Image (cartoon, rainbow, N blue to C red):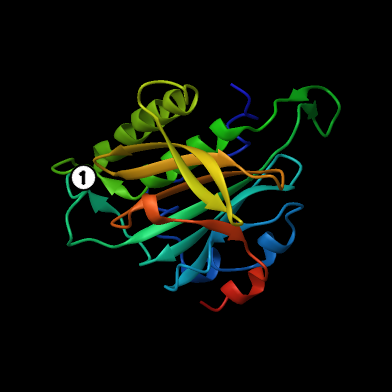
Amino acid sequence: METTSRVGAQAPDAEGAAQAAPSARRTVDGYLLAPFPWYGLDEAFTGPRWLMQVGTGADGAVEHGSIGHGDEPSVRAEGTFGTGDKERFAVVVSVAANPVRRSGDGTGVLEATSVSSAAWLAGVGLLSLTWPGQMDHSLRDDWLDQQTETAWVLADDLDGSDWSTLSLPVDGEPTSFHYRESEYGWVLAGSTKEGVHLGAYGRGMSAYGLGFSVVQDITSYEAK
């Protein structure tokens, strides 16, 4: 799989990724350091937009990050997918499309990022917002570890039967995405012409009507 140690990222903490303090989540500084453009939902979406977090590599360079849309999600129990009593949100994950390259210290090679990188980050992001019904708190970390590995396997097989193909506009141009649904929500992943891999995940908001575009002014999100 062409990813760099899962794009240099750890799986989101079971609760921290989903419930980071607004001051930690919404700082725009890290986003401004990214050498690639950020993507969000296009102008057809008129609801709230908010920053989440960026991910960096071992050398401190920003490699990926997420922008939220709609209701700010909390951890929810499984089994509610498809009902109308939950938050409606979609999170867009932008991942720098890096080729195979030398590590910063010159002692090794970092693998390339790919669409699978975006699919894995999106899948784990969705899992971090899910609490299995009737599961003891002490067991959730084990469950999350297991499901994270499953998300990794699924992301490594985007042409498998677990995924379908969905065409959505990116900067106004039809773009092919890999798409799947589960009891927790939906996940999709694709690539842009701007050298960015896109992942997205959500619940309560249909993926079929979404469109994506480059964020023109990321600083406008800081106060959202």
Direction bottom: furthest residue: 223
Front-most of residues 196 and 127: 196
Front-most of residues 165 and 52: 165
Instruction: Name the quadrant containing residue 78.
Output: top left
Direction right: furthest residue: 106
The residue sitting at 57% across, 32% down in the picture is: 6
Asked if 198 appears above or below 153 in the picture, the reply is: below
Please count the marks in the image. 1
Q: Amino acid at mark 1?
A: Glu
Residue 173 appears anywhere in the view: yes
The residue sitting at 32% across, 32% down in the picture is: 142
Asked if 190 appears above or below 40 in the picture, the reply is: above
Q: Quick one: quadrant of the N terminus?
A: top right
- In the image, 121: left or right of 180? right
The residue sitting at 38% across, 65% down in the picture is: 72
Measured from the top left, where is residue 24 in percent x and y?
54, 65
Label 1 Cα crowd, 10 Å radius (few <14 / some 14-19 / many 20+)? some
Measured from the top left, where is residue 124 in percent x and y?
43, 40
Residue 10 appears anywhere in the view: no
Residue highlighted by disc 1:
78
Measured from the top left, where is residue 26 in percent x and y?
55, 68
- In the image, 103: left or right of 141? right
- In the image, 168: left or right of 106? left
The residue sitting at 83% across, 22% down in the picture is: 107
Direction left: furthest residue: 134
- In the image, 218: left or right of 52? right
Measured from the top left, where is residue 184 in percent x and y?
28, 44
